[in-house]
Amino acid sequence: MQIELIQIPVVRDHRGNLGIVEGNTIPFALKRVYYLFDVPSGAKRGGHSHIEQEELLLALSGSFDVILHDGLKQHRITLNKPDTGLLVPKQTWRELENFSSGSVCMVISSGEFDESDYIRDFDSFIESSRAQ
């Protein structure tokens, strides 16, 4: 699995910085944006894979770890900068943990919510990744 971090263009100003996500910033058409916040200490999020959707994860505030698994290898990436996003390809298991206090994770997705696009059982994910 190749880990791809995407640099978000930033306009820097003495009044504060402005991060810009446009159509040419990410390698897919944006269909949905959602964010995680007020995640309790010790809680985990994710725990699924998408069959077709791709996502870009950004730590808008604070930090958290993303564990990615492609069916063969596992990687852990810490996100802690609002101008660096982690691309999560389709058919990649993801778990999010170690959220710092006040952290906010924004997710930009290539698809609208569709329950049939989720694999929520890790053993089923491993089985489907071996079938490819």
Image (tube, rainbow, N blue to C red):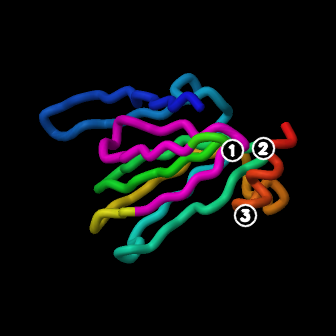
Q: How many marks?
A: 3
Q: CA distance from mark 3 to mark 2?
A: 13 Å
Disc 3 residue type (three-letter): Arg
Q: Secondary structure at mark 1?
A: loop
- The one nearer the camera, 117 or 2, is 2
**Image point (67%, 33%), residue name:** 29
Q: Give the quadrant of the N terminus.
A: top right
Left or right of 13 on screen, residue 82: right
Left or right of 17 on screen, residue 4: right
Q: Which residue is mark 3?
A: 120
Q: Work out whether 121 lies above or below 5.
A: below
- Magenta-drawn stretch contains 83: yes
* Mark nearer the N terminus (1 vs 2): 1
* Residue 71 lies in quadrant: top right
**Secondary structure, magenta segment, majority class:** strand
Give the mark toward the camera: 3 or 2: 2
Tag 1 and tag 2, C-beta contact below 8 Å: yes
Q: Secondary structure at mark 2?
A: helix
Q: Secondary structure at mark 3?
A: loop
Asked whether residue 131 is in view, the answer is: yes
Q: Residue 85: give x, y in percent of width and height.
A: 44, 38
Q: CA distance from mark 1 to mark 2?
A: 6 Å
**Image point (80%, 54%), residue name:** 117
Q: Residue 9: give x, y in percent of width and height.
A: 38, 26
Q: Work out whether 129 lies above or below 61.
A: above
* Segment tinted magenta in the rendering: 74-97
Q: Could you say which disc has been placed on residue 71 in the image? A: 1
